[in-house]
Amino acid sequence: AVAQAADVALPEAAWVAVVGYEDGADAVNWQVRQLMQEVLPAGVRGLEARAGAACWSLWQALAEAVDMPDARLSFKANLLSGAVASFCLHAAGLSEGIRLHAHAGSGIVYGHFAGDLTLQRLQEMLKGLQDAAEAAQGNLILPRCPPEWKRSLPVWGRPRGDAWLMREVKAKFDPRGLFNPGRL
């Protein structure tokens, strides 16, 4: 989907990693050379470098790919960066209809389920994903979900140990409970 939106050719593979750098030309060139020196001995295939206008459409498409309006349910997980790959592999094994978009450096993974999954099946999958996110010192929320399922699913993730602090701050800034009623 990203390759089509960006009108670029990406490797035909189950997984594609895109690495981006921002800085002055000398720093970016050094980072690209360093990356190539480190990954080529590992047998990485399809490695290529793009700069300037050659990569703008790809970055735009990647930024827009975070949202999938036709998804039945979408999640956003935050994890330790080192756990992103294993979390993605776990998530990919849950459903053929899942689309993943991960920011490995920040530990953010977006997932979108399309198709006719039942509430019960989604509850099972989300429990496994939430457990995996917690094991990676993170959490998982549902930015998109059928309204009739919201009472049955952990839309805001599992409560954490700092929920009391968030309630206190919210009470100070929103004493009448006008913003996000029922959230905390």
Image: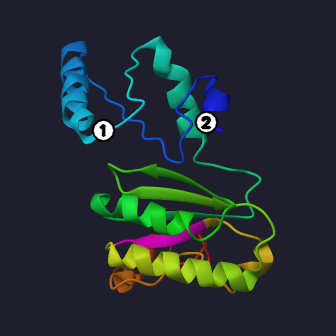
Amino acid type at mark 1: Gly
The residue carrying pointer 2 sits among few (fewer than 14), some (14 to 19) or many (20 or more) residues within 10 Å by Cα, namely: some
Q: Residue at x 38, y 58 (%)?
A: 85
Q: Which quadrant holds the N terminus?
A: top right
Q: Residue at x 25, y 37 (%)?
A: 39
Q: In the rendered image, is residue 11 in sight?
A: yes
Return the residue at label 1: 43
Give the distance between the C-alpha atoms of the residues marked 1 and 2, in whole angstroms.
Answer: 25 Å
Using the image as rendered, state which of residue 146 and residue 181 is in the foreground: 146
183 vs 108: above or below: below
Residue 57 lies left or right of residue 162; in this view the side is right
Return the residue at label 2: 2
The residues colored magenta run 138-142
Using the image as rendered, state which of residue 121 and residue 27 is in the foreground: 121
72 vs 28: above or below: below
Residue 98 lies left or right of residue 105; in this view the side is right
Q: Main secondary structure of the magenta part?
A: strand
62 vs 104: above or below: above
